[in-house]
Image (tube, rainbow, N blue to C red):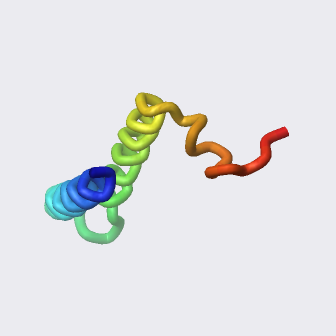
Amino acid sequence: MPVLLVFLASGLGGVLRHLLGGWAASRLGPSFPVGTIAINVVGSFLLVGVLEADGYERYAAGAGAATA
């Protein structure tokens, strides 16, 4: 199931990046990838929200890593 969620989320992120990039390029010009930066920032916040909701400590040090 987690692999399917990653697949769907990455597909959705790619589509949103394409749409927002096209929109931003038409409004601001294609010289700087504002749309890509915006969707990456939004995606980063969403990822942090998902990790926090699932219990971030499980992913923080890696599986089986020694902590101080």
User: How far from the left and from the top, in percent, is residue 23?
Assistant: 15, 57
Q: Which residue appears at 67% of the width and 47% of the height?
A: 61
Count of numbered circles in the view: 0
Q: Which residue appears at 45% of the width and 38% of the height?
A: 51
Left or right: 54 as drawn, with respect to 18: right
Q: Quadrant of residue 34?
A: bottom left
Left or right: 18 as drawn, with respect to 33: left
Q: Which residue appears at 32% of the width and 70% of the height?
A: 31
- Residue extending farthest bottom: 31
5 or 30, which is in the foreground? 5
State whether residue 28 appears in this view. Answer: no
Q: Quadrant of residue 67?
A: top right
User: How far from the left and from the top, in percent, is residue 53?
Assistant: 42, 29
Left or right: 53 as drawn, with respect to 39: right
Vertical comparison of 66 with 48: above or below:
below
Q: Quadrant of residue 58?
A: top right
39 or 26, which is in the foreground? 39
User: How far from the left and from the top, in percent, is residue 50?
Assistant: 39, 36
The quarter of the rendered structure image containing the C terminus is top right
58 or 15, which is in the foreground? 58
- Residue extending farthest right: 68
State whether residue 65 appears in this view. Answer: yes
Q: Which residue appears at 24% of the width and 56% of the height?
A: 4
User: How far from the left and from the top, in percent, is residue 10?
Assistant: 27, 59
Vertical comparison of 55 with 67: above or below:
above
